[in-house]
Amino acid sequence: MEIVNRKAKYNYQIFDTIEAGIVLTGTEIKSLRLGKANIRDSYVRVKNNEMYIINMHISSYENGNIFNHDETRERKLLLHKKEIYKFRDKIKLEGYTIVPLKVYLKNGRAKVLIGLAKGKKNYDKREDIKKRDIERNIRARLKK
């Protein structure tokens, strides 16, 4: 089970990545194991020297009862203080943002790969598309 944020590499230039754990409730982890999550519009914010993932959508668990979880609540990320401070300083001083790149299970634990990123301008996006098309054409010609 792996949920990937495909738009992240298109909309942002990723400079640094780090793996973090996520604090989840019982019905959230069950739903996540079924692959019913979306991180397309989510981002990470630092509050009180702790990191939280915001707008991560985990669908409600079908077999859950009335105590099912809120689908888009803020979820705390588990990181060492040094890692949080490093990312926090980059955000404040240099105008970076933190985006989730993928969510996956590792040894039964939910992990999120977050990246320190800067938003791309439209001309950067068009340039990347041109490079991709050129590489695709070259690969196609080499196969022939």
Image (tube, rainbow, N blue to C red):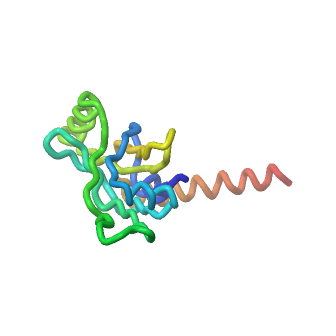
Q: Position of residue 75 (x, y in %)?
A: 28, 52
Front one among 96 and 22: 22
Residue located at (22% from left, 38% from top): 88
Q: Quadrant of residue 30?
A: bottom left
Q: Position of residue 12 (x, y in %)?
A: 39, 52
Residue located at (79% from left, 54% from top): 141
Which residue is most to the top?
82
Q: Establish if 85 lies above or below 101.
A: above
Quadrant containing the C terminus in the rendered view = bottom right
5 to the left or right of 56: right
Q: Establish if 89 lies above or below 72.
A: above
Front one among 82 and 86: 82
Which residue is most to the front?
65
23 to the left or right of 128: left
Marker count (numbered): 0
Which residue is most to the right?
144
4 to the left or right of 90: right
Residue located at (48% from left, 60% from top): 126
Q: Establish if 60 lies above or below 110.
A: below
Residue located at (71% from left, 56% from top): 137
Which residue is most to the left?
48
Front one among 129 and 88: 88
Q: Position of residue 22 (x, y in %)?
A: 35, 46
Q: Position of residue 58 (x, y in %)?
A: 39, 63
Front one among 1 and 12: 1
